[in-house]
Image (cartoon, grey):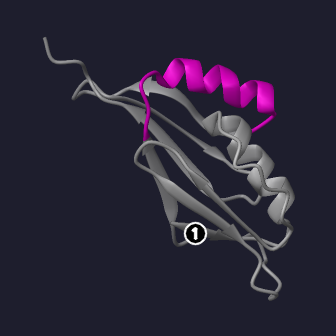
Amino acid sequence: MCLCTNDVPRLAAFYKQLLGIDNGSEDEIHQFLITEETALTIYNDGSTKNNSNQNICLAFTVDDVEKEYEKLLALGAEIIEKPTKRPWGAVSMSFYDPDNNEIFFRSLPKNG
């Protein structure tokens, strides 16, 4: 997936902290972040973005939504919905990244 932004270093820094990774890049035009099963590109194509993304959202499965929630609070992220247990057993939450992209985290119920 790719997030287009006006400020690559700012958005990349947020996701580096959030995902606990360092790509060794401070590039202002393009940064590629990769974790176990996810590749995220943050890119400035030169056009002006309005940061009013209303047609898409990103969702990530994480091990522990509560742990990620605390990390997001420390990062100063705007929380849309606090961690909530769903009737099917998953726990999910949503928040805005620095460019106002709507992001969902979910933890799936453990079988056993």
| Residue 7: % across, % down | 85, 66
108 magenta-colored:
no
Judge whether 17 appears above or below 64 on screen: below
Judge whether 17 appears above or below 50 on screen: above
Question: Which residue lies most toward the bottom here?
Answer: 47
The reply to whether residue 98 is visible in this rendering is no
Residue 70 figure quarter: top right
Residue at x 78% of width, y 25% of height: 74
Q: Main secondary structure of the magenta part?
A: helix
Q: Secondary structure at mark 1?
A: strand
In the figure, is residue 69 to the left or right of 72?
left
Mark 1: few/some/many CA within 10 Å (<14, 14-19, 20+): few
Judge whether 66 appears above or below 38 on screen: above
Question: Which residue lies most toward the front here?
Answer: 24
Q: Which residue is mark 1?
A: 2
- How many marks the image carries: the answer is 1
In the figure, is residue 10 to the left or right of 105?
right
The reply to whether residue 107 is visible in this rendering is yes
Residue at x 69% of width, y 46% of height: 15
Residue at x 61% of width, y 38% of height: 19
In this rendered view, identify the residue nearer to me: 31 or 110: 31
Residue at x 81% of width, y 74% of height: 29
| Residue 100: % across, % down | 72, 58
| Residue 8: % across, % down | 81, 64
Three-letter amino acid code of the residue under disc 1: Cys
In this rendered view, identify the residue nearer to me: 34 or 86: 34
Question: Which residue lies most toward the left here?
Answer: 112
68 magenta-colored:
yes
In the figure, is residue 90 to the left or right of 42?
left
The magenta segment? 61-77
**Which image quadrant: the C terminus?**
top left
| Residue 40: % across, % down | 57, 59
